[in-house]
Image (tube, rainbow, N blue to C red):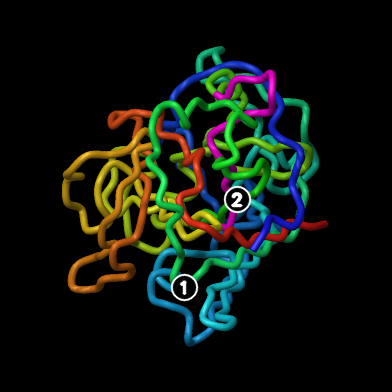
Amino acid sequence: MLILLSWIACTGTSKDSTSTDDSAVQESNTTDDSGSSDVRSFENCGTSVAEDVPEFYKKYFLCSTITVDNGDVVITTENLPPYKTYYYGEGDPNYAAWDDRGGDYHPNPNTLAAGTISARIPSDPVSKGLSITSALVDLQMGTSNEEFSGGPQGVSTDSIAMFNSTAAPGDDILDEEFTFDEWGSHPAGTTYHHHGANAGSLAALQYSGLVTSTTPGSTEAEVHGIMCDGTVLLGCLELDGSTVSGSLDAQNGHVGDIKDGSATYFSGRYHIHMCASLGNYGLAPEIQAYEDCGIVPGR
């Protein structure tokens, strides 16, 4: 299965870790200051999950329509953040003033808009058998045929597109991070997206009562989403709260069971630990570990 359409890569300048302080995102997600119900939030964004969808998606994903088709899970989203951000643009009920976080951060010139993304996650992904080394993981777009494509390549728990860990050719993702809002995200064109561990995906878990913090690296069940090939995106711990053990590859990935308590969601599944303290800046995977990636972004 091939990527059917690619997107323009990110624009912007500057760098930092993907970590976001809780104090920046504690404002209510459900209404604006006047109590308007027009504000998009986790409460009203619309989550529709079919009965036969695996429990992993039922438990952790919000603001999307999730179904099963021929055994594959299909996640469809409008890609509109269910929280306030500067990137909605002035006049929008979800607009928030830019927070420069001490002067280090500056917005890129784009304004987000709705754009349907449909990701088909294979039920039984086939490994490429790659050895993912630092020679492959260079944070530069277009240097390997094994990279995830540019544009949306996964879906986060908050329904927002996940891009890979690279910027457009000529740009540096570690510079672009200074254009991320308080949720750890920014738009490329009108496509709002994450590039790694972020407060937005953890806010979805917080709304569901699964975590108490939205700061990456300091919370309990830190699951950020899933890539189109089936790679699961975790934080600094395993999903069950245990310490990461064994060796990690150059993008903080390894194979293991994805489980939570007595429930095993995936057996022997390749997954990434998007955790700055473990290396690779807490970014999303650059290299696609499994064969198929089915994702259709559109307007």
- Position of residue 36 measured from the top left corner of the image (x, y, whole percent): 68, 56
Above or below, 272 relative to 264: above
- Which circle's residue, 1 or 2, is located before the other in the chain? 1
Please tell me which residue is depicted at 72% across the width and 44% down the height of the picture: 191
The answer to whether residue 70 is left or right of residue 264 is right
Q: How far apart, in angstroms, are the residues tagged by discs 1 and 2?
A: 17 Å
Q: Which residue is mark 2?
A: 153
Residue 87 highlighted magenta (yes or no): no
Q: With respect to residue 30, does 67 lie above or below?
A: below
Q: Quadrant of the N terminus?
A: bottom right
Left or right, residue 196 beside residue 296: left
- Secondary structure mostly seen in magenta is loop
User: How many callouts does the rendering have?
Assistant: 2
Residue furthest top in the image: 103
Residue range highlighted in magenta: 159-173
- Taking 218 as reference, is 53 left or right? right
Foreground: 80 or 176?
176
* Crowd tier of the residue under label 1, counting other residues whose Cα lies within 10 Å: few below 14, some 14–19, many 20 or above: some
The mark closer to the camera, 1 or 2, is: 1
Residue identifier under label 1:
123
Question: Taking 11 as reference, is 208 left or right?
Answer: left
